[in-house]
Image: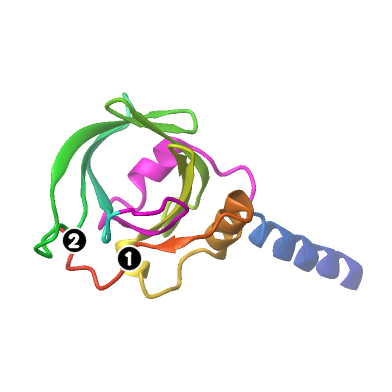
Amino acid sequence: MALIILLVACLSVVSADDCSGKTDAWTSIKGPKTGGYWLKQTTKTGENECTYVKGTDFKENTKTATYTYGYKDASGKLTKTTGTATAKGSDIVVGSDTSTVIYTDGKTCDVVKHGGHTELWVHSSKTSGGYNNCCDKKFTETRGSTPANEVYKKCPGMP
């Protein structure tokens, strides 16, 4: 009996730390359906500070949502653009842009590839930490030796 309990405990630890296979774009788009996501780090140089995305009007049957997104402009205000995000397997398509989900926990963070760059997105409630450690692992693993640039810095409240 003790052996069975030990095996179950070991398997629970392994599955709790399993960071593979969570690449569904629709799970990423929906997130927790409240708040939004800030771009925390990217391998792209010169990315605008306080880049964000916020989904609303989620349509399960078409796997689409309205996306509001933008960044902090020179005056310190957040820009605001609206588009439709569509999930296609592990791809998020907004207009002519496609991002590929490398990892999502559907609640606190996502790692995506966009335009050849790796990006770490963190839910607006987790900018000070507490997001899934698999996102840090996948971001580091995917970017390899490419330097990471911090994008989330003293950002105003999300619109």
Identify the image quadrant of the N terminus: bottom right
Look at the numbered disc 2 and give the secondary structure of its residue.
Answer: loop
Which labelled disc corresponds to residue 152?
1
| Mark 1 crowdedness (10 Å alpha carbons): few <14, some 14-19, many ≥20 | some
In this picture, residue 140 sits left or right of residue 39: right
Residue 142 at x, y = what percent? 60, 49
Q: Is 93 one of the magenta-colored residues?
A: no
Q: For the point 73% across and 60% down, which residue is it? A: 14
SS state under label 1:
loop
The residue drawn where x is 25% and y is 58% is: 35
Q: Amino acid at mark 1?
A: Tyr
Tell me the CA gap for discs 1 and 2: 12 Å
According to the picture, the residue beneath numbered tag 2 turns out to be 158
Above or below, 43 against 6 in this view is: above
Find the residue positioned furthest to the front.
46
User: What residue is shown at x 43% (from left), y 61% (from top)?
Assistant: 149
